[in-house]
Amino acid sequence: MTSSFRKRLLDAATAPYRPAGRFAWHFARGKLGRDPVFTGILAHGLLPAQARILDLGCGQGLLSNWITAAGRLHAAGDWPSTWPAPPALAGYRGIELMQNDVDRAGPALPAGAVVEQGDIRHSDFGQPNAVVILDSLHYVTLPEQEAVLARARDALAPAGTLVMRVGDAGGGLPFKLSNWVDRLVTFIRGHRLGTLYCRPVADWQRSLEKLGFQVQLLPMSHGTPFANTMLIGRLGG
């Protein structure tokens, strides 16, 4: 992927956030521009071709605009030859606890996408074919994590994909650094951060496998000093 393509993708994905205010736009630029997870989702083709996404802890709904922008560039013939075609966004529903983020998401969302205020521990999950959980499950207790994952499995069954990114609690200093940055970013977004319930990647993997997922691991810290890993869980083959 060339730097010029990355800039075109970033510009297209963040332009919708200008009406939401300076903070929303700058946050989108920083997150989409520097966090490797968004590029990783596209480069590795992690989502279904016709993706009905449930995004848990979605913040400003960045993933919806990222995928929409990717689809437009691909349709225009502007796409890396080594990447699979991006998914079509057949549906996007984000659930976010913090009302400030929901408010920032509202003016920016693509057609058909919705971000609603709610608690992922209790909200209805509907019937997506892809559940995305990026860096959000460690905010709830271990039993609550297991319950959310079980409900995600039930929502996806009999076939579907779960895409998670977690900090590896066995990752030493890089993990401690990622936790510090997590607290800083949460403060900048106007929230307070309490106890974090983090786990080693192997523990997350065992939990998903017990629920019937076939699990693939991908390192997801490229270009950062953190200890992050993507877990891709698939049902039905």
Image (cartoon, rainbow, N blue to C red):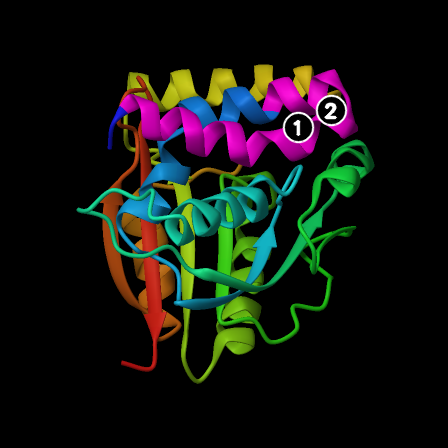
Residue situated in front as seen by the camera: 184 or 84: 84
Quarter residue 114 falls in: bottom right
Q: Residue at x 58, y 53 (%)?
A: 55
Q: Which residues are magenta?
A: 3-27
* Coordinates of residue 45 in the picture (x, y in percent): 30, 55
**Residue 34 lies within the magenta run:** no
Left or right: residue 56 versus residue 124 is left
Residue 196 appearing in the image:
no
| Mark 1, other Cα within 10 Å: few <14 / some 14–19 / many ≥20 | few
* Coordinates of residue 148 in the picture (x, y in percent): 57, 61
138 over 189 or under it: above or below: below
132 over 234 or under it: above or below: above
Mark 1, residue position: 194
Q: Considering the image in quadrants, where does the N terminus appear? A: top left
Residue situated in front as seen by the camera: 3 or 185: 3
Mark 2, residue position: 191
Q: Residue at x 32, y 19 (%)?
A: 224
109 over 180 or under it: above or below: below
Q: Residue at x 40, y 43 (%)?
A: 165
Quarter residue 79 falls in: top left
Question: Type of residue at label 2?
Answer: His
* Coordinates of residue 3 in the picture (x, y in percent): 30, 22
* Coordinates of residue 7 in the picture (x, y in percent): 41, 24
Tell me the SS state at disc 2.
Answer: loop
Residue situated in front as seen by the camera: 14 or 172: 14
Left or right: residue 99 versus residue 27 is right
User: Rounded to the nearest whole Å, what is the CA distance between mark 1 and mark 2?
Assistant: 10 Å
